[in-house]
Image (cartoon, grey):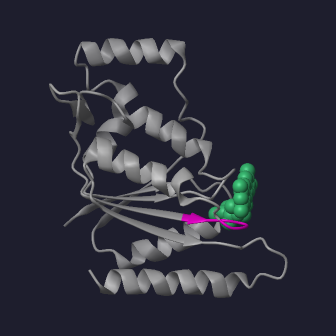
Amino acid sequence: MEKILYINSCIRENSRTNYLAKYLLSKLKGDITELVLDNTIKPLDLKSLERRDYLLANKEYNAKEFDLANMFKSYDVIVIASPYYDLSFSALLKNYFENINCVGLTFGYNDKGMPYSMSKAKKLYYVTTAGGYIINDDFGFGYIKALANTFYEIKDIKYIKAEGLDIVGADVLDILNKAKEKIDMMEEKQ
Ligand SMILES: Cc1cc2nc3c(=O)[nH]c(=O)nc-3n(C[C@H](O)[C@H](O)[C@H](O)COP(=O)(O)O)c2cc1C
């Protein structure tokens, strides 16, 4: 049975992004663990960076500072949900990436300076919803795709988005239903 990690960086209680991600998850086969991101996940500062460098240098990979990294590296499938914030994704999600991207633990560099994965995941889904239109997919999905490709050698990456939800007069249910139909088609092909 595949292990699926759902990284939920949706903030609002009635998040449309979480709603779509949950629909996607209902179509996937595997054991699902949900990780709800909140502001206990801090960005690196001088103190935490120095501590992390020390722990990595001493190969203390079981330190609590690496709980999120150790969790991430043990999952087969990653599902990430984030609302479209300021042309990209939420800062909560960026904080999470800063915490899990640890050289020597979740990924490494070979002699030629090229990154390689030390994590299990082979497949990733990214789900987002936007109030208006996503002006350039590269700023959100594109970044996540590059990260997954480069550090984690994940080739199978899928993108689910619903746009225009906050435009006056938008038929929100219809937009979400169309995104759900796309999920159905995507998963039927698997
Ligand atoms: C802090 C913040 C920033 C946002 N930035 C954008 C934006 O740059 N472009 C856009 O189209 N919508 C933007 N929105 C609207 C959200 O993308 C939209 O409401 C989305 O569906 C929220 O997802 P949720 O229902 O999962 O919370 C922003 C909303 C918030 C709260």
* Residue in view at x 27 percent, y 36 percent: 106
Question: Does residue 118 show up magenta in the picture?
Answer: no
Q: Name the spot of residue 46 as percent of width and height, x first.
A: 53, 13
Is residue 131 found inside the magenta-colored segment of the image?
A: yes
Q: Main secondary structure of the magenta part?
A: loop
For the N terminus, the image quarter is: bottom left
Q: Quadrant of residue 73?
A: top left
* The C terminus lies in quadrant: bottom left
Q: Would you place residue 114 above or below residue 26 in this image?
A: above
Q: What is the x, y in percent for residue 148?
A: 34, 49
| Along the viewing direction, whichever of 77 and 133 lies nearer the viewer | 133
In this picture, residue 174 sits left or right of residue 184: right
Q: Which residues are magenta?
A: 128-133
Residue 14 visible in rendering: no
> Which quarter of the frame holds ligand 1?
bottom right
Report the residue at 44% width, 74% height from top: 24
For residue 94, side relative to residue 55 (left or right): right
Which residue, as the protein is rendered here, is positioned at the far left? Answer: 111
Residue 110 seen in render? yes
178 lies above or below 84: below
Residue 114 in the image: above or below residue 143:
above
Specify whether 2 is left or right of 143.
Answer: left
Apparent side of residue 119 relative to residue 124 in the rendered image (left or right): left
